[in-house]
Amino acid sequence: MPTRATQPSIDRLPTDRRFQQGGWLFLGSLCVFFLASILLYGFYAYSRRGDPLSALPIPMTFLVSTLCLLGISVLVHFATRMIRRERRESTAALIGLSAVLAIVFTGFQILSMYTMLSGPAVQEGNGKGLVGMVIVLAFLHALHVAGGIIALGIVSVRLLQGRYDHERHWPVDFAALYWHFLDLVWLFMLVVFWTTTGGFKWSA
């Protein structure tokens, strides 16, 4: 009888830990991927330091979109606090608003990439050069943002279904961690873009 009484808690704890370990492993693999990509970009930028087209500015809309990303990080942070108080509706609202900001961020990113594709570095370049690499990195980041939007939608629906509470809230925490990670990666990318190109300008 004691074994049966304690069995549910014994089974649940390793399961939760496996989910957490899987989440951290996923973020770790993404960290290696983005660090390797940015490092390769740095080598490429150094090899093209004499190319005049590499000194062209990139759109200021990249900076505008960053404000959306910072806003998302703030919202999901507060969402993790709300679920610990079992305020599911408030948590779902914060996550839903985060998803809207993420869509706005993606729109600004698409606009920025379109501006660069229409600029002289691509139209007059030879393989599109350094600006082409900026577009590739921004596109890779945008793909992971799209995955984050889907994740926010799933978590929001499950919140309204009552699947999370003050004890079981790892998916909400993981969604927040994922967006904090995307935020840090994008800020790092911006610094690299700023130091390897002609900086930021409203019209590129």
Image (cartoon, grey):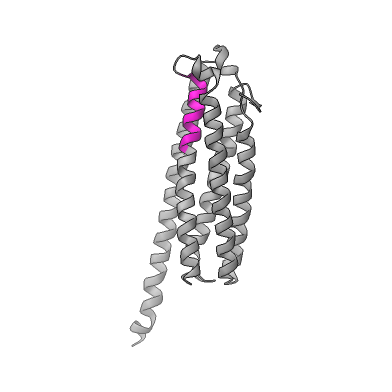
As for residue 134 lying within the magenta part, the answer is yes
Lateral position of residue 71 relative to residue 142, left or right: right
Residue 80: x percent and y percent? 58, 62
Examine the rendered structure and indicate whether residue 76 appears above or below residue 114. below
Count how many numbered circles sit on residues in the image.
0
Lateral position of residue 173 relative to residue 1, left or right: right
As for residue 116 lying within the magenta part, the answer is no
**Quadrant placement of the N terminus:** bottom left
Residue 73: x percent and y percent? 60, 51
Q: Looking at the image, which residue is at 40% across and 55% down?
A: 22
Q: Looking at the image, which residue is at 55% across and 17% down?
A: 120
**Quadrant placement of the C terminus:** top right
The region drawn magenta spans 128-140
| Residue 76 visible | yes
Query: Depth check: 29 or 107 in front?
Result: 107
Query: Depth check: 15 or 74 in front?
Result: 74
Lateral position of residue 88 relative to residue 24, left or right: right
**Secondary structure of the magenta portion, mostly?**
helix
Query: Depth check: 22 or 76 in front?
Result: 76
Residue 151: x percent and y percent? 46, 55
Quadrant for residue 83, please give it. bottom right
Examine the rendered structure and indicate whether residue 90 appears above or below residue 110. below
Q: Looking at the image, which residue is at 61% across and 45% down?
A: 68
Residue 51: x percent and y percent? 54, 12
Farthest residue to the bottom: give it.
1
| Residue 42 visible | no
Q: Looking at the image, which residue is at 38% across and 77% down?
A: 8
Quadrant for residue 16, please give it. bottom left
